């Protein structure tokens, strides 16, 4: 009997949505484990007022995985006018909050919402409770709050929680059984790593017999990964999950328009240099593919379909798998 390969994507912010937007069309059993450490914007306000996990990243994942994405996006991203009691809140955030209030569990809320919108992929919050992320800078300063960590303009030493938080059993099961686990894209310290700090995650990754892949950011993120190379990204990831867990890193070293690079250097930071030999010395294979594009606003983005095709090509699809 044939079966579909199981693919788990771990991340948050807008990055995980890019990865999922391409993967959802492939013949795979897809699961998204989504960060709930966000404390900025509408999510931060709702999180504080209702003492609930922030809905923003979960909203973006619902949109990305929907089969009627443009329609859902128009509705979910609609923000009520400022100055009203609902001012600044996207409708999607309020819908997730309402379902969480109804069910009393954010995981069950997401299950019901994906059934409501006929979304086949699983959407799993990284943990079912409100969490506070802390960042320790290299000079010893400790900053409280996911949204505040990048604003110090200091090099980050580590991110952490002040108490032990257990990952849901379903999340651990999905990780243990996955044929491909994808880390990224997205903010390294505030979108990717917060998911990996939870109790049980490191052990589940080590039990996994499939392939673990990191999609490296193409551009540096000011205040978070300024002057970081690809090796620096991978090293920070391995410091959390352990050596020998990551098998491959996906990059794109192809040339970008000089005007684009100049704009980034002026406002947002430079391109992430790929120091292939240092990564390979860690026993990690570097996969260099044509997966980047420059959008109409001059921003460097990962192309969702090219990235999805690259990830799918890495799965061992022989034997009992559906090809």
Image (cartoon, helix red, strand yellow):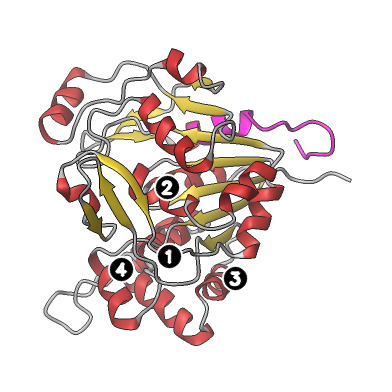
Write down the residue under mark 4: 43
Left or right for 259, reference 36:
left
Dot placed on the residue nearer the N-terminal end, 4 or 1: 4
Position above or below: 128 against 86: above
- Residue tagged by mark 2? 193
Q: Considering depth in this image, is 255 or 206 the residue closer to the camera?
A: 206
* 80 or 316: nearer the viewer: 316
Marks 4 and 2, the one that precedes in the sequence: 4
Rounded to the nearest whole Å, what is the CA distance between mark 4 and mark 1?
22 Å
- Disc 1 is placed on an element classified as loop
Q: Is residue 165 magenta?
A: no
- Determine the CA span between mark 2 and mark 3: 29 Å
> Where does label 3 land, which residue?
115
Q: Quadrant of the C terminus?
A: top right
Give the magenta-colored segment's residue range. Answer: 307-323
Residue bearing the label numbered 1: 163
Quarter of the image where one finds residue 228: top left
């Amino acid at each position: 009997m044939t079966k579909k390969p199981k693919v788990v994507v771990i991340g948050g912010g807008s990055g995980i949505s890019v990865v999922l937007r391409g993967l959802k069309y492939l013949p795979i059993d897809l699961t998204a484990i989504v960060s709930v450490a966000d404390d900025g914007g509408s999510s931060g306000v709702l999180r504080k007022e209702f003492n609930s996990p922030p809905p923003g990243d979960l909203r973006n994942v619902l949109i990305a995985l929907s089969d009627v994405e443009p329609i859902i996006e128009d509705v979910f991203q609609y923000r009520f006018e400022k100055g009203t009691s609902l001012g600044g809140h996207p409708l999607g955030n309020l819908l997730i909050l309402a379902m969480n209030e109804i069910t009393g569990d954010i995981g069950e809320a997401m299950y019901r919402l994906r059934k409501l919108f006929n979304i086949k992929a699983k959407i799993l919050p990284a943990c079912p409770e409100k969490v506070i992320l802390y960042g320790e800078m290299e000079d010893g300063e400790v900053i409280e709050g996911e949204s505040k960590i990048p604003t110090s303009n200091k090099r980050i030493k580590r991110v952490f929680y002040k108490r032990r938080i257990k990952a849901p059993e379903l999340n651990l099961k999905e990780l243990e059984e996955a044929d491909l686990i994808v880390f990224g894209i997205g903010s390294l310290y505030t979108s990717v790593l917060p998911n990996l700090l939870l109790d049980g995650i490191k052990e589940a990754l080590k039990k996994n017999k499939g392939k673990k892949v990191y999609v490296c950011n193409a551009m540096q993120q000011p205040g978070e990964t300024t002057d970081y190379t690809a090796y620096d990204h991978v090293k920070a990831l391995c410091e959390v999950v352990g050596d020998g867990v990551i098998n491959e890193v996906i990059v794109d070293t192809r040339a970008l328009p000089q005007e684009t690079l100049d704009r980034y250097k002026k406002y947002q930071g430079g391109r992430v240099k790929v120091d292939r030999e240092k990564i390979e010395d860690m026993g990690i294979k570097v996969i260099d593919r044509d997966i980047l594009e420059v959008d109409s606003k001059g921003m460097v983005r990962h192309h969702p379909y090219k990235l999805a095709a690259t990830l799918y090509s890495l799965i061992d699809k022989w034997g009992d798998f559906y090809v």
